[in-house]
């Protein structure tokens, strides 16, 4: 597997933004052929598009895009002449594709019938899904959505390691484990949502124990149990899952939502100034960079 592809996978798992840089046209004498790629993050670079000032300028442009928050791909033409410090004499067109991880993270603890149904629904939404279950033989046989990282643990320490702002759903096969995870989540004031599956009786028992464990009423009020929209009145896993995901969407932090105006991108890319070749009347692609 090429280094740039490994890098994209690793950056995705870490929730870190990057730019995929590709040569999409190579005319005449050029350092690399069309199709080569590299990945640029805020602090690192993987693979190469040929080195030299072409690569240096492409890295700088990539970091300009990252800093701007742009999501729209941009192309830039590079005449490989004196102005770029290269004497190849050819020209290349470079495509810059910002790759930004979803800003909304959801953690599901439990891969039972409801957990599976919830994961299936979230797999089609713009979120990063972390899915935990202590039963390796269960989770490893599940179809895992593309936006999901599945982990065969489900401990309080996993709660402690979640990114700030994560929405947490607790629906394991064990009520004792549900309690431990719920307590650990409530001790994380930076989580955006805490929902535990169960009945009103289960909630009352949990709240009583949590109160004895020292949690105050304001903190206990953050617990959504039973999780899901009220009055759905169904015990079918798929219908419960719909009510749970609907409640998650209602409580989703506003800053994680993408704009709904299709005529505008989430962030307009900054202009990328092309490097001229230094010759009067040059027509080798020295015009302004364009959105892809």
Image (cartoon, rainbow, N blue to C red):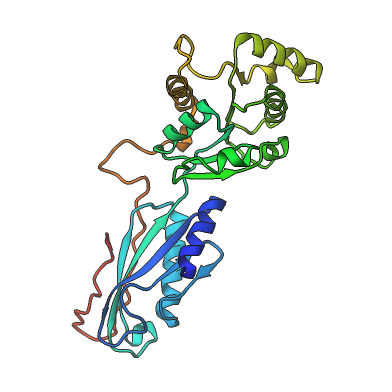
Is 255 situated left or right of 28 in this image? right
Residue 101 % position (x, y): 47, 48
**In-front residue for pair 46/231:** 231
Residue 111 versus residue 229 in the image, above or below? below
Is 87 situated left or right of 170 in this image? left
Residue 46 versus residue 237 in the image, above or below? below
Is 205 situated left or right of 281 in this image? right
Quarter location, residue 49: bottom left
Residue 286 versus residue 20 in the image, above or below? below
**In-front residue for pair 145/47:** 145
Residue 133 % position (x, y): 61, 36
Is 211 situated left or right of 138 in this image? right
Residue 106 % position (x, y): 53, 36
- Residue occupying image coordinates x 50% and y 63%: 6
Can you name the residue that lies furthest to the bottom here?
A: 87
Q: Quadrant of the C terminus?
A: bottom left
How many numbered discs? 0
Residue 91 % position (x, y): 28, 81
- Residue occupying image coordinates x 54% and y 52%: 13
């Amino acid at each position: 597997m090429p280094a740039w592809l490994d890098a994209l996978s690793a950056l995705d798992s870490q929730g870190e933004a990057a730019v995929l840089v590709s040569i999409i046209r190579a005319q005449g004498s050029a350092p690399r052929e069309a199709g080569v790629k590299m990945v640029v993050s805020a602090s690192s670079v993987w693979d190469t598009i040929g080195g030299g000032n072409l690569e240096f300028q492409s890295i700088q442009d990539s970091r300009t895009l990252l800093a701007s928050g742009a999501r729209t791909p941009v192309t830039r033409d590079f005449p490989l002449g004196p102005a770029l410090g290269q004497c190849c004499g050819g020209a290349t067109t470079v495509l810059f594709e910002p790759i930004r991880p979803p800003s909304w993270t959801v953690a599901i603890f439990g891969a039972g019938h409801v957990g599976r149904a919830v994961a299936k629904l979230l797999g089609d939404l713009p979120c990063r899904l972390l899915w935990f279950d202590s039963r390796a033989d269960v989770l490893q046989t599940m179809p895992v959505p593309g936006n999901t990282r599945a982990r065969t643990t489900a401990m309080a320490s996993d709660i402690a390691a979640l990114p700030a702002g994560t929405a947490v759903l607790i629906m394991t096969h064990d009520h004792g484990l549900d309690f431990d995870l719920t307590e650990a989540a409530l001790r994380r004031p930076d989580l955006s949502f805490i929902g535990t599956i169960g009945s009103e009786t289960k909630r009352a028992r949990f709240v009583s124990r949590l109160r004895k464990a020292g949690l105050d009423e304001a903190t206990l009020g953050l617990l959504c149990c039973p999780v899901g929209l009220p009055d759905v009145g169904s015990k079918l896993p798929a219908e419960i899952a719909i009510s749970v995901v609907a409640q998650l969407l209602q409580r989703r932090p506003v800053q994680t939502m993408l704009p709904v105006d299709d005529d505008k991108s989430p962030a307009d890319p900054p202009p990328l100034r092309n490097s001229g070749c230094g010759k009067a009347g040059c027509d080798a692609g020295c015009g302004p960079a364009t959105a892809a």
